Amino acid sequence: MNIADQIYSTDSANQDRAQAIRDNLRDAIVDRRLAPGTKLSEGEVGTLFDVSRTVARAALQMLSFEGLVRTERNRGAFVANPSPEEARQVFASRRLIEPGIAIAACGRVTSADIAAFRAQLDEEGRFIAERGPTARRSEIKASGDFHLLLASVAGNAILQRFMEELVARSSLVIALYGRSGVSACGHSEHTEIVGALESSDCERASQLMLHHIDHIEADLDLRVRAGPALKEALNF
């Protein structure tokens, strides 16, 4: 292996490490183990994952591009802390996009897709029936995964990437402003949407999705909830 190959190999390995750290931190943010406003020190992230500050910084930059982390000059990186106006914009965006995604998915859905939706609903239901913070976090994530599955069935890769960001940002908003202690994303409403998809009632699927998003937003208030520190949230 020549010098150029060694440099490329090192860069590739560091990029893989940064991506893995990004995935870990993203999961902790999305399922609300890391609360909005939590400081994400490059040094602490590097120590926890046994990587250099450069690799840790790259991971945090990835999250910053997604809007999940904000960086402040001379202060560092923090889990994004969306304002009430930003929260309204997130759900306004979802109201514009998701009813159309529901119609697109309805036109493409197969029996295998319906089976996948039913399995997703079963997973949601299982977590809802369980107790404790771990089950609650899992239920929140499963609820978000329903919307990502719908976007996948719709068959538009660009919209699917938009939805990944919107679902992640919605999780932050719910973490900060949600009234209820469980996911505001209603399991029964998901069931109704799947029923509309299965019966090829595309207009009803779209209307149900719009109502569903309105219901999620209606559960929000302005109370801030504290969360665990970075080390505890990542179970180190």
Image (tube, grey):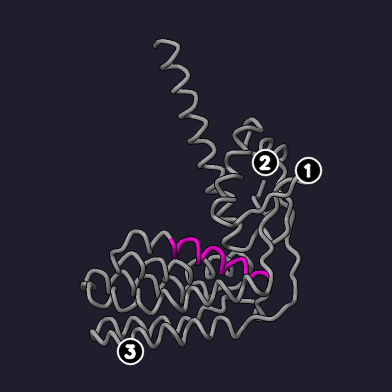
The mark nearer the N terminus, 2 or 1, is: 2
Extreme residue in the top direction: 2
Asked if the stretch drawn in magenta spans residue 168, the answer is yes
Quadrant for the C terminus in the image: top right
Extreme residue in the right direction: 74
Q: Secondary structure at mark 1?
A: loop
Q: Is residue 9 above or below residue 46?
A: above
Q: Which residue is mark 3?
A: 204
Q: Left or right: where does residue 35 sit relative to residue 117?
A: right
Q: Which residue is mark 1?
A: 74
**Distance from the alpha carbon under mark 3 to that under mark 2:** 46 Å
Magenta stretch, residue numbers = 162-176
Which residue occupies the foreground of this view, 144 or 210?
210
Residue at 74% over, 51% down: 39
Q: Is residue 230 above or below residue 136?
A: above
Q: Secondary structure at mark 3?
A: helix
Q: Amino acid at mark 3?
A: Arg
Q: Amino acid at mark 1?
A: Asn
Q: Which residue is mark 2?
A: 45
- Residue 100 x/y as whole percent: 35, 77
Tell me, yes or no, whether the two marked residues, 3 and 2, touch with CB atoms within 8 Å: no
